[in-house]
Amino acid sequence: MKQVYIYDTTLRDGTQGEGFQLSGLDKLRIAKRLDEFGVDYIEGGWPGSNPKDVEFFREARNLELKHAKLAAFGSTRRANVKVEEDPQVRLLLEAKTPVVTIFGKSWELQVTEVLRTTVGENQAMIRDTVAHLVANGREVVYDAEHFFDGYKDDAGHALATLKAAAEGGASSLVLCDTNGGTLPFEVEEICNAVRKFLPDTPMGIHTHNDSELGVANAIAAVRAGASQIQGTINGYGERTGNCNLTSVIPILQLKMGIQVVNELERLRDISYFVDDVSNNPHFARAPFVGRTAFAHKGGMHVNAVQKLARSYEHIVPSSVGNAQVILISELSGQSNILLKAAELDMPLEKGAPEAAEILKRVKELEHVGYSFEAAGGSLELLIRREMGRYSKPFEAMEYHTSFRQYRDGHRPVCEATVKVTVNGQTELTVAEGNGVVNALDIALRKALMPFFPEIAEVSLVDYKVRILDGHDATAAKTRVLIVSAHGADTWGTVGVSENIIEASWLALVDGIDLFLQRR
Ligand SMILES: [Zn+2]
C-alpha cells in the first residue's frame, strides 16, 4: 500500500481552465502518458455533462492502462429521485470505469440555497449514490465540495455529510477547497479533526490555487494523514488553477521521502507534453520543470554552482528530468536522450559521443523553435540519423501549393504539386484538398504510393499550429505539430519555419519518413 496516491484530474477539472481545451484524441494521448508516468488515478471526464466525455470513456477501454485506474466523475443523485432512476448516475455506470468519483454538498448554505433541499435529504443523496455505485462493483471516491468553508460554517453538518459517504461505502473521502481560500494551517487543523472523527476511511485532498496555496494546502493535508492528492499537470484548472501535481509530486518524493511515481525523471517531459498537446506556451519559471528552474546567471552564482551545485540548487535537476542552464556541461540534459534511445532499443552509454552530438543537435533545433516533447517521431529520426540507423527512403525535391477563392460562392480550391525521387526515379503528382496542408498530404502520399503501397494505411489524425512569439526565438516563427497513425500506433512530428506551409511540409515529411524507417 502506498502512503499517498496521486489522482490526476487534468482531463476533467483541468479542462475547466480558460485556454485549456483537449480533443478526444488529446485526452487519450495524455491518459497514456499519465499511466506510463505512474499516477494512480486518471479522472477522464463527466459523462453526464457532455457527450464528448461519453465517447472518451468508450474509446479509453482500448487504452490498456498498465497501472492507473480510470475514473468517471459526476454528482450525487438529484433530490427526491430514486438513485436507480437518476439518468446522470446511470451514465456514470455506463462509462464502465473501475472507479467513479462523485461530489456532494458539505456546506449547509449550499444545501438549502442551491440544492433547495433539506439537510437530511442531502445526506441520503450522498449515502444512496455511493452505496448504489459500490453495489455495482465500483470503487467510489467521494469529493466533499466546499468542505473547508462548510466546516468553518458548521463543523457538525460538514462531518455528517462525510459520515454519510463513509456509510455508503466510499473508499476515500476527499476534502475539497473548492474556492481556494483556505490557508495551510487551517487545512492541517481541519484534516486532523476529520481523521479523528472518521479514522477508518482514507482521506484525500482537492485544492485550488486562488491564494497560491494549492500545493501548500495539499502538503498540509498529507501531514495530517491525507493519502490521496487530486491535482492537474502544470496546475491547469479554472480561475487560477488546481493543485499543481508537477510541483507536489517532486516535493513528496524528493523532500518528504514519500514514493508516489516510478519515473520522476520524466516529470519535465510530461509537463511539456501537456503544454504542447493543449497548444499552450510553456511557463519558463515553473518550479522543478521550467526552462529557468535551474538557470544560473551572473558570474558568482555560476562559479559557485560549478564548484558545488547544491549551493544554489534545491534539488538535483536531473531527478525531475530537468537540467542546469548556463553551466555548459557535456552531460547536461543527456539523461532525456539516453532514456529515449533506450526506449528505441538503441542503448547509449552515459557520456557517449553520439549522445553529446544528439543533444547538441536537439539544443540547436530548440533554439530555433523546435520542441520534441510531443514530437517523439521527429526525435526518433534525429537519433536514428546520429546513430547510423537511418536510410533515406525518398528525397522530397519540391512542392507548390495554391489557394483559389471565388467570389460567387463556389467552395475554395486548394491544390498541391509534389515532386519526390525514390531510387533515382522521379514522381510528380498533383492533388486537391480541403485545405493547403490536406492537399500537400494527399499529394505527397500519392507520389510515394507506387514505391511504398503501405503508405495508404497511414493517416494524418491531428494538426496543430503555434505561432512562437519573438521572445525566445529571434523572429516570429510557426511551429506545426502533426500526429500520424497506422492502426493503433500513433506518432508525433514537428516542423518549424517562418512560413506555415513550409513548417507543415517538414512535419508531414518526417511523419511519412518515420513510418518507412520503422517498417
Ligand atoms: Zn476542483
Image (cartoon, grey):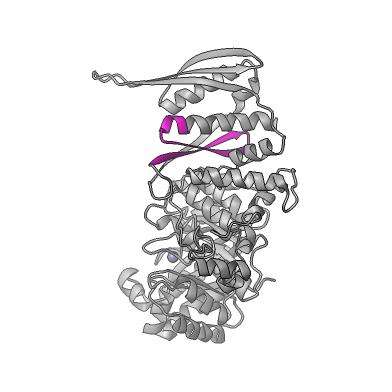
Residue at image point 47% right, 55% down: 46
The percent position of residue 392, horizontal first and vertical second, equals 65, 26
Of the pair 284 and 71, the residue shown nearer to us: 284
The percent position of residue 84, horizontal first and vertical second, equals 50, 60
Q: Is residue 511 above or below residue 162?
A: above
Query: In the rendered structure, does residue 489 fall within the stretch colored magenta?
Result: yes
The percent position of residue 439, horizontal first and vertical second, equals 45, 23
Q: Looking at the rendering, which quadrant does residue 182 occupy?
A: bottom left
Q: Looking at the rendering, which quadrant does residue 13 occupy?
A: bottom left
Q: Residue furthest left?
A: 408
Please say whether residue 351 is visible from this viewpoint: yes
Q: What's the magenta bit mostly, secondary-structure-wise?
A: strand
491 sits to left or right of 120: right
Of the pair 162 and 268, the residue shown nearer to us: 268
Magenta residues, as a range?
Answer: 476-503
Q: How many numbered markers are drawn?
A: 0
Tell me the quarter of the image containing the C terminus: top right
Residue at image point 61% right, 80% down: 200
Quadrant hosting ligand 1: bottom left
The percent position of residue 457, horizontal first and vertical second, equals 61, 26
Q: Is residue 174 above or below residue 362?
A: below
Q: Is residue 501 above or below residue 60?
A: above
Tell me the quarter of the image containing the N terminus: bottom right
Query: In the rendered structure, does residue 463 fall within the stretch colored magenta?
Result: no
Q: Is residue 218 above or below residue 14?
A: below
Of the pair 332 and 508, the residue shown nearer to us: 332
Residue at image point 47% right, 57% down: 12
Please say whether residue 131 is visible from this viewpoint: no
